[in-house]
Each structure stands twice: as C-alpha cells, then as structure tokens.
Amino acid sequence: MNYEFHLKARIRLSGEIEDEVLRELEDPVKERINKGVPEGRGVSKIEMRADGTGIELEILSDRYLRAHDALLRIRKILSQELGKRRVGLRGIEIRDYTITMDESLNVRLKVPFIKEMRSANGKTTLKLDVGETEIEKRIPDRILNLIEEKKRAKEYGSKSEHWELVFESKKKDFKYNGDPTEEMIKRHWIKHGSCRGQWIYGPQITKLFRTFEKIVIKELLEPLGYHEMIFPKLVSWDVWKRSGHAKAIYPEIYYVCTPKTRDPEFWEDVMDYYKVTHEIPVELIKEKIEGPIGGMTYAQCPPFWVFLQGRTLPDDVMPIKIFDRSGTSHRYESGGIHGIERVDEFHRIEIVWIGTPEQVIEEAEKLREGYRRIFEEYLDLQWREARVTPWFMAQEGLTETHENKSVGTIDFEGYLPYKQNWLEFQNVSVNGDKYPKGFSVKLQSKKDLWSGCSGIGLERWAAVFLAQKGFNLDDWPEKLVKEIRELPEVFRFL
Amino acid sequence: MNYEFHLKARIRLSGEIEDEVLRELEDPVKERINKGVPEGRGVSKIEMRADGTGIELEILSDRYLRAHDALLRIRKILSQELGKRRVGLRGIEIRDYTITMDESLNVRLKVPFIKEMRSANGKTTLKLDVGETEIEKRIPDRILNLIEEKKRAKEYGSKSEHWELVFESKKKDFKYNGDPTEEMIKRHWIKHGSCRGQWIYGPQITKLFRTFEKIVIKELLEPLGYHEMIFPKLVSWDVWKRSGHAKAIYPEIYYVCTPKTRDPEFWEDVMDYYKVTHEIPVELIKEKIEGPIGGMTYAQCPPFWVFLQGRTLPDDVMPIKIFDRSGTSHRYESGGIHGIERVDEFHRIEIVWIGTPEQVIEEAEKLREGYRRIFEEYLDLQWREARVTPWFMAQEGLTETHENKSVGTIDFEGYLPYKQNWLEFQNVSVNGDKYPKGFSVKLQSKKDLWSGCSGIGLERWAAVFLAQKGFNLDDWPEKLVKEIRELPEVFRFL
C-alpha cells in the first residue's frame, strides 16, 4: 500500500521573526530534512511562512519519511537555529493532517484521534485529530499499523488458526462411552459452584487431580530439575501490557476492582442497605469501587516475570526451570452448561523454563518425551500432537505462525469417545524472546535469552482420561491405580 | 427501649362498600387482631373508614404487635370477610408510618425507606417511607434491628474484640532478631508482585511453605482422616449472603466484574485504543463490564458449602473431615508496605469438619493438640493461644462472644522478636450451626448439625518461624531440616 502524507501546522515561538530570518532558516531545513532517506523519496515539499510569533508550515511526504516524523525533525532543526537568535519554540499546533492510501479499505478503527476516514475509487483518505503530544507518542504510526493489521485480518479472516499434525499415539481400547461430567454429577464427585462455569470438586476427583500432579512431579519435574515457585494470581494491567495480553483478551477477563477506601463509614450505606433489604446494592457498590486494576489469572506465567523484571542474570544459572500450581485461572467462556472440559475457573500446573535458544528448544523436547511416557504408561491415552499458532500470538488475536520456525506451540489433544472429537488438554510452547524482551530481562553475556512454558490443565487431563477409561478402577492402568491407591468415599446424600 | 407504632394506610378494593358493611367487618378485625398477644398489649386503637372503593385505616400499637404486622393481619381478615361479599383487595398504600422510641439515639441509618429520623428530649421519632412490598419483606423490622445494633455498637464501641489467654508455650531461644521480609528481599527469596500487598515467592520460601504443608498433612490431616477437596475461588454474592459476610466485608473485598458480552466487536474500541495509545482505557472498560458479581476468596470455606447446600446427610457419614489448598485468598488491607505477615494476597490450607456438636468440639481439640505437637517438635516456636470473638462474628462486624460457650475461635499467636509483639498465625474455630443453617444442610435424624474450620496461613507460619529462627539452617529444628532437606538455589542476579 502506498501512502501520501499531507500535514499543516503552526509552530508557536517566544518572539516575532521576520520573513527574512525565515528565509535563512529554510536552507538548513531543506538540507537536513531528508537525511538518510533514499534519493528522491521522503519529503517532497516544505512551505514555511512567518506569521507574527509563529511559523505556518506545510509538509508533503511519502512513507520513507512520514510528515509527522519530518515535523519532529524540523522542530529540532528550528530549535537549534532559532536558539542562536534567542528565540524559543513554544509548541506546535497541528491544523490539518491528511494521509491518503492508494487502496479502498473496508476497515473501521474505533479510536479517538481520527476525524474522518473515507474510502472510495481505490483511495482511502484519513484525517487525523492529533497534537504534538500524540505525534511524540507515535500515535499516527500505531494508527497506520492497526489499519494494516485489520486489513490483513480481513484478507485472511476466514483462515483459521494454524494446525498441523506432528504426532499420533497408537489407537487405544476405550472402556467407556459416556460423558464423564454427567457421571461425576450423578456420583456426587462434583457439584456446580455458585458462579458460572465453576465446579466444586469432591474428594474422589481431587484425589485424581493430585495423583496427576504427583506423577508429573515424580516422573517429569524432579528428574528434569524443576523447582516450585508461587506466582501471583491477581494480574495488573502492567503485566498484561508487557505480556501482550492487553491487546486482545478483554472479552474473556474476570475484571478486578478495589474499594475506593477501607473507611467503614464510606461503606455504611451499603452495609445498612444490605442489612435492611437482604439484597446487595450492586449499583451503589459500583460507585464505590475503583476501576478495574486488572483481572484474575488468565495465562498463568505472565505475573511470574515481574520476579525477573529489569534484571540481568549470569549465563551459568541457565537454564532456569520452575513451575507453579498455587491457584486458579479464570476465563469468561461462552455461556451455557459445559462439562469440566470447558470451565471458567480451572486448575493448572504451569511449567516455565528460560535459557539460550538451544537450551529452551532442547528442554521443550524433553518435556514432550516425558509427557508421552506419562500418557502411555500411567494413563494409556489415545492422543495426538499438533503444531499450532503460538499461544501467545493466539491470545493477542493473531492466527499466523512465528517467523522463527523454532518458536511455536505444540498442542496435545486427547480423544473423547462420547463426543467423537478431540480435546486440547495441554501444550508445550517455545516462546522465543517474547517474555525476556517484554519484561526487560537480560543475560550477562548479552546473548539471546528465550523462554518456554507448558500448561497442564488438571480438568482437561481428567476429562480425557475419564472419557476414555470410565469409572471402573479395574479398567484403569495398573501404574495409575498403584499411585492413587483408592478413591475416598466421604459424603453420601439422601 | 419502648416503641410506639402509628400507621395510617388506605386499602384499595375492587368495588365500593357501604359504611354499614364496614361496621360489620370491624367486629372480626377487633376480635382477631391481638390474637396471641399478652392481655392489654398489642394494638390499642384501630380506626376504619369506608372511602369509595377503599378503606382508610389507622393503627396504634406497641412492640407486642407492631402496627405493620397488625396491618398484614387485617389484610388477611378483610380478604376473607370481603371475599364472602365478592369484593377483592387491590393493594395497600401506606400514608404515614411513624415509630416513636422512648430514648434519644445518636445513631444514623443510611438507607432509603427512612423519610425522617429525629432525636430530642429523650425521644426518637422515625418516619418510614415504605409500601406494602417493604412490609411483606419485613423492612421495618430490619430497620429497628439495625437501630438496636448501632445503639449497642455505640455503647460498647470502645470495647475491643474479645481476647482471653488460654495457653502459653514454653519460652524459646530466639536465634534471630531481624525482619524476615527484609532479609528475604535481600536474598532474592521474594519480590514484590505488580499489585498491592502481593509477593512472588521464589524456590526457597516456596519449599518452606510446601514443607509446612507436608508436615500438616502427614502429622495431622492423614492421621485424623481428612480428605482433600477443591473449593471455588471466585465467590458470588449468594455465598456471602448465606455465610453472613455480606453484612460487613465491603471495605476489604477484591471485587470481580464480568464482561457484558464476549462479542469481540463490542470490545473493538478498547483494543483499538490500547493498540494506538499503549494505555488501558479504564473508564471505557468500566462501561463495558457488569457490576460486581462478588469477589475473590476472602474466607476460604464459605464457597465449599454450596456442595452441601439444600441437602440431607445420613448421620453415619459424620463427622465429615475435609481440607482445601487450591488457591489464593485476597483482602484489601491497609496501604503502605508490609512484610509477608500482612498481605493482600495470601495462601492458606483451610480445614473443615462437620458433625454433631460433640463431634465438632472433640475434633477441634484434636486439631489443637496436633498443632501444638507440630509447633513444638518441628518448628520449636514460642506461641500462645487465646479465645477470641468467633471469626465469623468478627467478619460480620461483631465484637462479642457467642451465647454458646462451646462456639468460638482460638487464635494461635506467635512471637516476633524483631517487633517485640505477637502475630496471629492461625486459628481453630467451632462455628456452631452457623453454616449448616445458612446453607440449609440437615442431618437425617434432624439432630443438630455443627461445623468447625481452621485456617493455616502459610505466610504467617513462615513469618513467625523465620522471625524466631532466622536463616541459618543449623539453627533450625532437626526434624524440620530432615523434611526440607535443602533449599534450592535457582536464581542469581548481577
């Protein structure tokens, strides 16, 4: 796509300048403006006109030097030249900024800063409503990036997420053909919590979850030298800005708000209202809370990275291998009743490793091998593995694969006989330099620093396992039964 | 306090009645109105006047039959009597409702439904703004209860929470005199998370937490026959209504709000704004979320009770013994920087037991003995135990003890040498029938059903232990070191 940039502005000065002085300024401006820009490109026209205590300015340029960047160059040059004459710059007012693209575009941007956007006859005209601050913050550039992004999304919109089969387990004997969630409800193993997509897990299924955990720790994490940490479970905007989640996860966040104050008197009307009506005055509460500071855990590893944020690590501590299983993750999923394979509140062991690209890639392979061994020996599952759009890209709303072939996500999918369909039940990802870059973490040697992560969804493991093996322990693999010993019977109901 | 109730209302009818008919109705009303009320008490005056298709009514009464309750009685009687004459009741309009108390009161209620409240000359006059619905919902009664509650709070306001020493351990040798949080920061064991009162726990301190857990499970929970469950970590208003927390915890809740919809188009302006400015449009998001549906976990056991809600259990499964350690709790604590002994996000093993009163009381004793053994043998702590206001009453804003002496909370307090002060680091509570009642859980035999709970704060245990024993493993009790083996060294920073 080709661009034409047309900008009109007025530069305010601390004193008057004569037309003559301005003529003297034109030379250094015209000489230096296209520095570093290919011959014949960049700014094609500059007009400057003295106007009392200001300069009226008109710039025409192409994408090799966008007019707003040219404006910043001019500001710098004028500031130097006028400084010699004891005149200062007092700010810039953008009178008009029109960007013309040589294509009709069927995209819509919902942001302030856009006065008008029109497409017709193979052209798109964009009129921006920006000032000096917005130009310094590179708002026009980000608007153009977003237009390009939306244009691409329209073009490839129908293309679904990348999916490429890379491994398939042997076919297995299924011992069961029912929906495990239904059966667990019947057996009082689980009961719906009071929130959407939330289950309360009774002793039997919790024992199964904890046995999965025990196997993962014993067979995978301990032999490979992983150590447990505790990652935060309330996530601030700042973390999601750095992880990239702030670009796209809004429709699925469980947002968190804090009280405006802890002063009990401030809350007295809410308490009184409740005590008198036995109803929660939600609208009144809304006025008394700050609003949202972030949300409940969505992806599990981002808030860990604050531990390393801004730090430099010696090369010899690499690779770093850690995991967290200290709490819940929450996503606002689509409504309706789903089983434990699709929940709003779920439990996951999150594994993170950090090192040189070679170390990170090698570690991902070791984990994949370990998982395969567990799925064969302990769970006897039928599963397959697929290379998909990297999770961190998917969660930013992207559908491509990474430019670097080593960076990517392997999804493990288990077969659900009762649905005759596959369910993604865990993944292994090499995230490249995404997180070290986002959180400014460096190696002492300045070599590339990469990371990987792998999420083990306990609900998903159970959903796949129970769907294939059912509820008769005689049908379960011996090695698993040996670990689980027996399922506790605690409750009975009338 | 004595009350006088004076109510004026108009009952709307489906047709006109003659004065004569009304006279016929007066007899059954006057005859039946004070039924069950002590002689000479209750309603002292009733006046009824036919008025086209309505009856004007005036009632004067005392606290033995509040005028609004009398009104409901009259409605019932009239409905029966007029039914015989094919006239129906069409609703009641309260014209004026004044309640007079024989005391000056220095309390203030911040609720709708109160038109005016005035105190002077040893009298308080309360004019209510209520309709038929509010009377059916017992709003006037709850207003009077709240007045009594606030009056009591004023009288006993300066009285602090109940506190009564019941046990003291032996004096111990302290090996350390520093603030463990400071030392842990220096050692990179912990780092502040990106939210207020939130820490990220590195491998060493996490190992200590998990060792505490292991000891509690091995020495206490397994021998006593406890089984693990997974309690929800997002708590709805409905749970807090039933648990009583809805009365008072508003100043400390981390509120949770859900998106109004998952439709990505609805969120496009938020995403666009972020992509263009790299700033989160918090005000815009506020308009796009539903107002709080509840909050993050405050007390850990209430959301478990939904598992039993509305159910009847056979007597022979009692006592039920369970625990949860599946996630974080969050409280909006007072600002400023605190150590790990006072945090907004914390980790706790929550133990719950349910049974007959005898079973519940006996179990609490067993737990206390178990804790004492652990604190002596594994942690070698100096601690004390105090009987305090039951936690579930404290969290409802009350300061008294329970009327039943067996119901109550024992706080365990550990000594912090660096602060020369005590820190509550766990508790054991007998909660009486509070939770079974609140969540409608019954025994088959209809006998009393009680419950207890005990929260083990991992941060608090660590805060007390490290404050007394320091960071030199040679100073730590042998039995603990044997469990912990070694503290993992994973990170180093430049």
Image (cartoon, coloured by chain):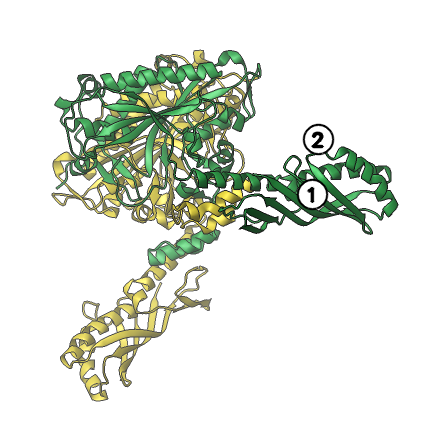
Chain colours: A yellow, B green
Q: Nearer the viewer, residue B395 or B6?
A: B6
Q: Is residue A47 left or right of residue B299?
A: left
Tell me which amino acid carries mark 1: Leu
Could you say where residue A183 lies in the image, as x and y percent from the top left? 52, 21
- Packing grade of label 1 (10 A; few <14, some 14-19, many >=20) is many
Q: Chain of mark 2?
A: B
First reached walking from the N terminus: tag 2 or tag 1: 2
Q: Chain of mark 1?
A: B
Quarter occupied by the N terminus of chain A: bottom left
Kindly indicate whether the residue at mark 1 contacts the one at mark 2 (C-beta within 8 angstroms). Answer: no
**Label disc, if present, on residue B39 of the rendered structure:** 2
The quarter holding residue A387 reads top left
Where disc 2 sits, the SS reads loop
- Packing grade of label 2 (10 A; few <14, some 14-19, many >=20) is few
Which residue is outermost to the front?
B121
Could you say where residue A396 lies in the image, as x and y percent from the top left? 36, 47
Q: Is residue B344 left or right of residue B114?
A: left
The quarter holding residue B395 reads top left
Residue shown at 32%/49% (left/top)? A241
Question: Which residue matches tag 1?
Answer: B60
Q: Could one spot residue B233 in this view of the protein? A: no
**Label disc, if present, on residue A404 of the rendered structure:** none
Q: Could one spot residue A237 in this view of the protein? A: yes
Residue shown at 46%/46% (left/top)? A268
Figure check: B62 above or below B268: above
Q: Is residue A7 left or right of residue B207?
A: right
Q: Nearer the viewer, residue A486 or B461?
A: B461
The residue mark sitting in front, 2 or 1, is 2
